[in-house]
Image (tube, rainbow, N blue to C red):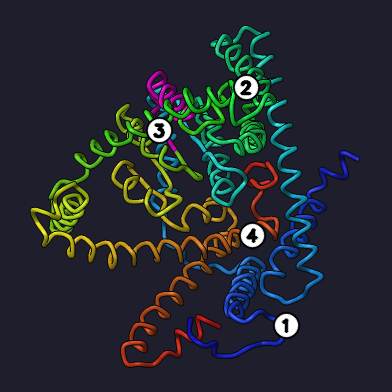
């Protein structure tokens, strides 16, 4: 690691830039949300396609399968739950049967009641509480591959019109996405780690890559202020790109300024 | 008391304080905060363990409910509950040997391995569908995939020594760069998501629907 560029008393050396960036991101998100600034945000095809997928299922009279991952309450799972809430409302609105396979890990036992509450709330908000069936949120297993077996079984038996698989899935993601494709469902997935992304991109009709899934809450919100917070992500991605380009150029001519800045 | 605990503002305050207690000691050199953070993490681990236990009990009750109603597939719930109780009893006898060890290492793990092995066929069918040279980009992707595939295959190094440096170059430059890009984008997304959570703009955290 290169020498640090500067130090600030009280802040641990090597973590100063990280601290400043975190505070800046928080301040910018607060600014965009509180000022309700109207900003342009790019479309996310994977999230836009959810409505089309649920609508197609309703037209075909087939169920919608939506899962939020096999992990505990991580940000991937929370993003998956937000998408589940959206799917549940669309399903309640269109009268489609919604199946939510749960389980896959010990921690998933904690998430299940939260998911149950989210789906029930969505049905209540759409005035379709009578359509809500807790048996359509089966707990398949605390074991990853037993869960996959159950998930695939559900898809083979019910032949869903769409499968929306978000949250943190590991190697099980490919089994689910490929089976979904085999049963002719519109497949929307999110890759929670890099090794999964390439495989899921091949197996799915739409994929949420990188920060698109965590941004779902704001993106799907009707509130323009919430959506504006996504702008911060784009700004920081541009900053990262600029740092990478300048860093490569500077390092190539023997200047270690960016390296030292990143070490700060 | 239950009403106070369900208060959304209170939940957000607790969440924000917990966040600060873990976030700040990572950056700031304050020993008292470090101690408090370590204690909070220990408390969280204990609470999580109890939450899992509670969730298992809730699952048990749900299963019993389905059995009593004789809902569709109720006999699978009987099987699940019986195995749940049996595994609990087995684990109390010891996990390194005895029936628990046997079930895990002779039944669960081999079955999981079989499922994992099947993944190869899923990958093959996905690749067969996706890797078609429809245009120049797809052609490049196909070529790169073929080179990496050959490199991974046994004996390729012996017969085609020129493949190895090309495959390593593809992985170490393009693959690595894409991985870093993914990491940066996910990290920024996670921080923005976290800020929205603390500001109470992510209702899914509290088990609520979308636009409450």
Q: Are marks 1 and 4 on the same chain?
A: no
Q: Are marks 3 and 1 on the same chain?
A: yes
CA separation in Å, label 2 and label 4: 41 Å
Camera-side residue: A161 or A263? A263
| Whole-percent x, y for residue B100 in the image | 59, 24
Q: In what element is the residue under mark 1? A: loop
Residue on which disc 4 sits: B196
Q: Give yes or no for residue A156 being in the magenta stretch.
A: yes
Provide the residue span drawn in magenta: A146-164
Report how many numbered discs are placed on residues in the image.
Answer: 4
Circles 2, 4 touching at the beta carbon (< 8 Å)? no
CA separation in Å, label 2 and label 1: 51 Å
Residue at far right of view: B1
Say which label, 3 or 1, has the lower sequence index.
1
The rendered magenta stretch, by its main secondary structure, is classed as helix
Residue on which disc 3 sits: A162
């Amino acid at each position: 690691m290169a020498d640090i560029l500067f130090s600030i008393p009280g802040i641990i050396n090597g973590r100063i830039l990280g601290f400043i960036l975190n505070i800046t991101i928080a301040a910018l998100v607060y600014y965009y949300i509180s000022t309700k600034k109207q900003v342009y945000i790019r479309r996310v095809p994977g999230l836009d396609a959810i409505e089309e997928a649920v609508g197609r299922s309703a037209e075909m009279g087939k169920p919608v399968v939506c899962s939020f991952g096999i992990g505990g309450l991580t940000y991937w799972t929370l993003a998956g739950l937000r998408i589940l809430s959206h799917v549940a409302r669309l399903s309640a609105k269109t009268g489609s049967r919604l199946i939510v396979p749960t389980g896959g890990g010990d921690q998933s036992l904690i998430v299940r009641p939260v998911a149950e509450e989210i789906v029930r709330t969505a049905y209540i908000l759409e005035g379709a509480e009578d359509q809500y069936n807790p048996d359509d949120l089966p707990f398949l297993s605390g074991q990853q591959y037993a869960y996959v077996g159950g998930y695939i079984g559900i898809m083979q038996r019910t032949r869903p019109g769409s499968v929306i698989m978000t949250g943190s899935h590991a190697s099980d993601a490919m089994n689910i996405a490929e089976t979904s494709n085999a049963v002719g469902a519109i497949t929307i997935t999110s890759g929670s780690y890099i090794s999964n992304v390439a495989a899921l991109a091949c197996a799915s009709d739409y994929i949420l890559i990188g920060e698109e899934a965590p941004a779902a809450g704001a993106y799907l919100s009707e509130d323009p202020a919430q959506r504006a917070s996504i702008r911060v992500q784009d700004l920081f991605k541009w900053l990262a790109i600029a740092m990478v380009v300048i860093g490569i150029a500077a390092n190539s001519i023997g200047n270690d300024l960016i390296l030292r800045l990143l070490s700060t | 008391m239950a009403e106070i605990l369900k208060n959304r503002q209170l939940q957000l305050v607790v969440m924000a304080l917990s966040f600060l207690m873990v976030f700040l000691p990572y950056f700031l050199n304050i020993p008292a905060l470090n101690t408090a953070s370590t204690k909070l993490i220990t408390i969280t681990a204990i609470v999580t363990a109890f939450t899992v236990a509670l969730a298992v009990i809730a699952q048990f009750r749900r299963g019993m409910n389905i059995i009593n109603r004789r809902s569709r597939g109720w006999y699978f719930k009987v099987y699940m509950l019986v195995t749940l109780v049996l595994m609990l009893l087995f684990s109390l006898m010891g996990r390194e040997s005895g029936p628990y060890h046997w079930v895990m290492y002779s039944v669960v793990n081999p079955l999981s391995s079989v499922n994992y092995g099947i993944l190869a066929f899923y990958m093959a069918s996905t690749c067969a569908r996706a890797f078609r040279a429809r245009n120049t980009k797809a052609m490049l992707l196909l070529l790169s995939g073929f080179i990496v595939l050959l490199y991974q295959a046994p004996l390729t190094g012996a017969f085609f020594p020129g493949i190895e440096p090309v495959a390593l170059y593809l992985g170490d430059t393009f693959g690595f760069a894409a991985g870093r890009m993914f990491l940066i984008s996910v990290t920024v997304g996670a921080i923005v998501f976290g800020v929205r959570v603390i500001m109470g703009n992510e209702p899914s955290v509290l088990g609520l629907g979308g636009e409450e």
